[in-house]
Image (spheres, rainbow, N blue to C red):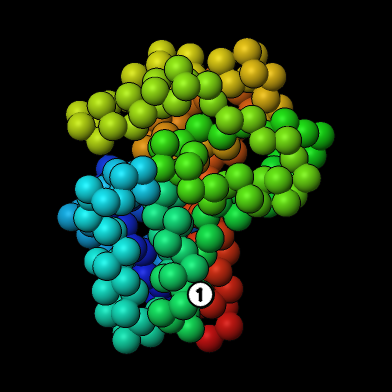
Amino acid sequence: MKDFFTIIGGMGTEATESYIHQLNKKTDAHQDQDYLNYILVNHATVPDRTDYIIDPKNHPDPLKPLAEDIKQQSKLGPEFFALPCNTAHYFYNQLQSLTSIPILHMPNLAVAAISKKFPSAKRVGLIATKGTLKDKVYETPIKKAGYDLVMPTSEIADETMQLIYDDVKEQNWVDADLYHHILDQMTNDLNCDVVILGCTEISVAEERAGSDGYHVIDAQSELVDESIRLAEKMQKSK
């Protein structure tokens, strides 16, 4: 296959399925041949990223299997990589150093979208895994862009982990009331102008439950849009 990109997924599988669904849904296709060429690596057995980031001494390193995926897939010659797992971007620089093929940076894409979609925003909230909250993959670009970063309270962070792990990962179920409650607290209690959905399981919640008018930036949706833009540009140039 020529003119394709590779998706390093499976973290988790339902979140990757959401990325694929949005990718195909947003592609302007009217026949089989109009869809995009891509390889999906659904590496479901990659160790939990948050566990490792929070307690690396007692949990296996996700970098090793991810590095193997990048090396293997690079031999096939994709035009770019998509990594639909926010927390895995903790390893972004190490993974990119293994290949000359560009890896799209989902957190950077999400932050860049703020000025386009919410130009008056100043206070940017973040909901994500505790691993992402700790590893600063969002904190650094948000502050560099000149925004005030609003981190969730410990209560909101716990509720977000419940949504991500207990609901979506464990049961493939979205508690819409919990999701909206989290957004309400971030928006009205913490006075966020916009909230970044910094976990692809939260993107699953957004896809299934919607955000009821709250100002959100869905990082996975931004990754989908950039994947389509680059893939269509690639196809037109051939």
In the rendered image, the vertical position of residue 170 relative to residue 44, given as above or below: above
In the rendered image, the vertical position of residue 109 relative to residue 175, given as above or below: below
**Secondary element type, mark 1:** loop
Q: Indicate the position of residue 62 as horizontal and vertical percent values.
A: 28, 59
Q: Indicate the position of residue 2 as horizontal and vertical percent values.
A: 38, 84
Which residue of the protein is positioned furthest toward the front in this rendering? Answer: 57
Residue corresponding to mark 1: 102
Q: Which residue is found at the position 50% from the left and 32% from the top?
A: 127
User: What amino acid type is highlighted by mark number 1?
Assistant: Pro
Which residue of the protein is positioned furthest toward the right in this rendering? Answer: 120
Q: Left or right: 176 with respect to 140?
A: left
Quadrant where the image shows the N terminus: bottom left
In the rendered image, the vertical position of residue 172 relative to residue 139, given as above or below: above
Q: Nearer the viewer, residue 231 or 149?
A: 149
Q: Which residue is found at the position 25% from the left and 36% from the top?
A: 169
Q: Which residue is found at the position 32% from the left and 24% from the top?
A: 162
Q: Left or right: 221 with respect to 36?
A: right
Q: Indicate the position of residue 195 as horizontal and vertical percent values.
A: 60, 31
Q: Nearer the viewer, residue 232 or 194?
A: 194
